[in-house]
Structure formats: structure tokens, C-alpha cells
């Protein structure tokens, strides 16, 4: 590795030696700036290396910011609101019964209709939002009541 890179690595290793948490690039840049201020009068080559590190970090931060902005713009473009389904806008959704009594009445109405002869228990159950066993129980109860 070039000598300049090795010197930069030593300077960053000094930062790590103190075991201070670095959460962002800005934190690291502040620490390098602080080190640069404290070592300004000592060795000129070390201050030059710190300035180079600071320039590198600024370039990395700027690249990160521009990539983040590009990604946000791409997400905004791809998440454009979809046009509403014409069927859903013209036909209001069928109200669902929230009580067991309401669901039972809906099942009884379906079973009483002539089209229920063509439907399976699963189809009726999925229409109302209950299990096929519930539909079967209601069908049996309706048959018992009619036979008495």
C-alpha cells in the first residue's frame, strides 16, 4: 500500500483506539477535524494526512447523499398511485355481517335460494366468511326444521 494510505490508516486507528462510537460519517468527520485542530502545530505531514482523510470522508458523504436522493426519487416514481379499479368504483362492496346472527341469516338466505344447489359448502362459506362446517350445521338445522 502507498505510504499516504498507511498513514491515513494509522490516524483512523488512533480514533478507533479510544473506542468512541461513531454512528455517522459526520461523527467521524468531527473527530478527524478535532484531531486535526489538536495536531496542527506538531507535524505538518500528519495534518496534511488528516486533511486528506477529511476530504475523502466529505466525498463519501456527498456520494451517499446523492445516491440516497436518487433512490428516494426512484421510489417516489415507482410508487405512483395506481388508478382505481373501475369495477370497484362502480359497485360498492357487499356489507359483511359482523355478528354470528348476521352471518347465520346470510347463510340461511343463500341456502334458501335455488342457486345454492349449484354451490359447494366451501363456496358458500367463503362468500360469507365462515367455515364449511358452519354452513353444513346450518343446512342440517334447516332440514330438520322443515321435516318437523
Image (cartoon, grey):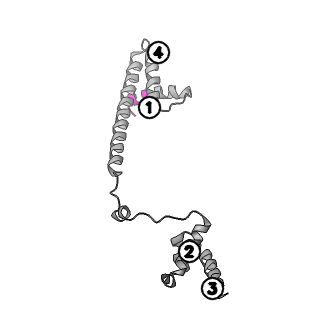
Q: Are marks 3 and 1 in contact (CB under 8 Å)?
A: no
User: Which residue is found at the position 44% from the left and 28% from the top?
Assistant: 26
Placement of 46 over or under 100, stated as above or below: above
Q: Which residue is mark 2?
A: 107
User: Which residue is found at the position 65% from the left and 83% from the top?
Assistant: 145
The residue sitting at the bottom extreme is 147
In the picture, the quarter occupied by the N terminus is top left
Q: Which residue is mark 3?
A: 146
Placement of 96 over or under 79, stated as above or below: below
Closer to us: mark 2 or mark 1? 2
At label 2, counting other C-alpha atoms closer than 10 Å, the crowd grade (few under 14, some 14-19, many 20 or more) is: many
Q: Please give the range of residues in magenta.
A: 1-9
Q: Main secondary structure of the magenta part?
A: helix
Q: CA distance from mark 4 to mark 2?
A: 81 Å
Q: CA distance from mark 2 to mark 3?
A: 16 Å
The residue sitting at the top extreme is 41
User: Which residue is found at the position 35% from the left and 52% from the top?
Assistant: 81
Amino acid at each position: 500500500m502507498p505510504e499516504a494510505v498507511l498513514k491515513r490508516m494509522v490516524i483512523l486507528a488512533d480514533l478507533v483506539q479510544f473506542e468512541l462510537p461513531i454512528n455517522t460519517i459526520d461523527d467521524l468527520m468531527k473527530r478527524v477535524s478535532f484531531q486535526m485542530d489538536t495536531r496542527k502545530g506538531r507535524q505538518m505531514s500528519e495534518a496534511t494526512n488528516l486533511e486528506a482523510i477529511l476530504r475523502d470522508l466529505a466525498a463519501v458523504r456527498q456520494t451517499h447523499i446523492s445516491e440516497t436522493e436518487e433512490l428516494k426519487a426512484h421510489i417516489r416514481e415507482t410508487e405512483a398511485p395506481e388508478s382505481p379499479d373501475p369495477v370497484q368504483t362502480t359497485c360498492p362492496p357487499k356489507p359483511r355481517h359482523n355478528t354470528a346472527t348476521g352471518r347465520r341469516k346470510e347463510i340461511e338466505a343463500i341456502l334458501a335460494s335455488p342457486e345454492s344447489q349449484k354451490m359447494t359448502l366451501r363456496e358458500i362459506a367463503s362468500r360469507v366468511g365462515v367455515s364449511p362446517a358452519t354452513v353444513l350445521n346450518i343446512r342440517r338445522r334447516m332440514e330438520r326444521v322443515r321435516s318437523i
